[in-house]
Amino acid sequence: MSMRRFRSNPKTLGDVNMVTEELKNLYYKRLLPIEKYYSFHHFHSPSYEDADFDNKPMVLVMGQYSTGKTTFIRYLVEQDFPGSRVGPEPTTDCFTALMHGETEGIIPGNALTVDPKKPFRNLDPFGNAFLNRFQCAQMPNKVLESISIIDTPGILTAAKRKLSRGYDFPAVLRWFAERVDRIILLFDAHKLEFSDELTRAFGALLGYEDKLRVVLNKADRVDSQQLMRVYGALMWSLGKVFRTPEILRVYIGSFWSEPRQTCDHYQLIELEEEDLLTDIRNLPRNAAVRRLNDLVKRARLVRAHAHIISYLKQEMPTIFCKESKKHNLIYQLPVIFTKIQQQQRVPAGDFPDCTKMQEKLLGQDFSKFKTLKPSLMASLDKLLSTDIATLVPLLQQQELRKKSLHGMLDGEFLGTFRPEHFRRDPFKEFRDDESCEADFDEWAVEKYKPKYDEIFYNLSPNEGKLSGTKVREWMTSTLLPNSVLAQVWRLSDVDGDGMLDNEEFALAVHLIEGKLEGHWLPRELPAHLVPPSKRLSSASDDE
């Protein structure tokens, strides 16, 4: 994949950085002082750090065991990653953060929590039981240059619900849910089950439904009638859990890089695949908007928290019966929430979960609470009413330049068979000494070319070339996902004319056969696979 396909437009990147810096300044200047004053982090999430603002967009992948989480991630990055295992049993017992790095390796959880450049420093309170099950897998990968991916342990089924993880699994999920840009929740189309731990995991995602995308995976393994019933059952179950008027987006697909099984809804799977990849591909573009949204949501919660703490402080007696009054106030917390909503005009949606707040208050000393400080509240109101509004023009400028941004997943090539997506030869732009020497190497496809030529001429080429339409018709018969076939097309159409000659077609068939045998496709075409005629033309163009 050409490096230019990954690089953002400099002006757009500048807008994103400018918005991020402004958000960071507003947080440290306006919001953090009031968080500290009212001990916000004792009740809710820890304070933000620079890495929380500067980090790449993150995608949290979760689901029950054997729903295809790790395979889905391998499908996105198109390669294995350190520590990954795939199997029908619970193979993933760790939280694994996949991040870009110049060298491949694994960083253990305890080391991650002391790295100021990583956004995981605030995971330390979950203790060693969790940190021993947390790691970062770094590797050079084009996709990871734009996003980071969090792989999670498989959620236990009802048969295993008595097992203990040793740490608060829903709390860890909620910590990540607050900070990630997208949450991908996978279900198995022929093994749909809602366990106790899954229901608790759903509870950790409440309030972050806007980030959630549900995937009904392995849909090619069931027929259309079964798929319709499973889809209906899934929607009904999700409606019972989330209880929102908005319907969650459910993608139907089979997300892996292997040939799919033939089914009546094959075209539906392809369309859903394109929609989901487009959604993920847009995350870097929308990173600043997400940070702005999360900061506003946090500021509203801080405002509600300050009013709650102040009210409890004012209601506490000076000397006698402090403990009994404390328990009485905790018991009456739902009523107190209503009073604050009416008296201070704070929307009900800004308040924290009442039950969880009551649990947190039990261990607090109400005498140390503080009443409202007018200067801090005025600063918070200014943040919500004025400061945020000044960032909107910058975001609008960013929106206008979105078209100049290119995607970073293989799914971006779903349209490469269309004329407007014909591209230049990537070898003209990125050559090195090795590629020049490789001009004299034997072409790795040469010995298989006779059998590939037979297929080529059976497809009736016109003036020695096959059109994109004919090639696509033949490629789709392999049942490989469109994203994989489109990458094959990109690698094979070396001269970028939107057609394949006999050498380019032989290369395409060779790549497809390698993929069917289980090999990964290269991101860029190695020198030994460049057709001989294209090596000569490329060299003459460079001269």
Image (cartoon, helix red, strand yellow):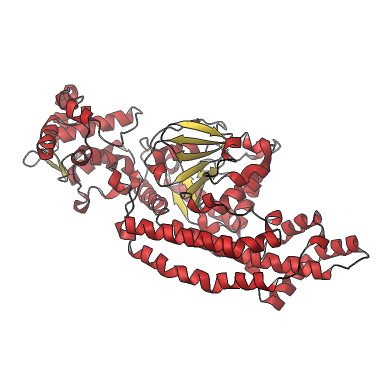
Quarter of the image for residue 17 reads bottom left
Q: Residue 189 location in percent, x, y?
A: 49, 43
Residue 347 visible somewhere in the drawing: no
**Viewer-proximal residue among 258 and 447:** 447
Residue at the image position 63 percent from the left and 73 percent from the top: 378
Q: Is residue 199 left or right of residue 479?
A: right
Q: Residue 453 location in percent, x, y?
A: 14, 30
**Viewer-proximal residue among 381 and 417:** 381
Residue at the image position 72 percent from the left and 61 percent from the top: 354
**Viewer-proximal residue among 176 and 513:** 176
Residue 81 visible somewhere in the drawing: yes
Q: Which quarter of the figure is the C terminus placed in?
A: top left
**Viewer-proximal residue among 170 and 252:** 170
Quarter of the image for residue 333 reads bottom right
Is 318 above or below relative to 535?
below
**Residue sitting farthest toward the right:** 320
Q: Is residue 173 left or right of residue 259?
A: right
Residue at the image position 89 percent from the left and 60 percent from the top: 323
Residue at the image position 76 percent from the left and 65 percent from the top: 370
Q: Is residue 191 left or right of residue 446?
A: right
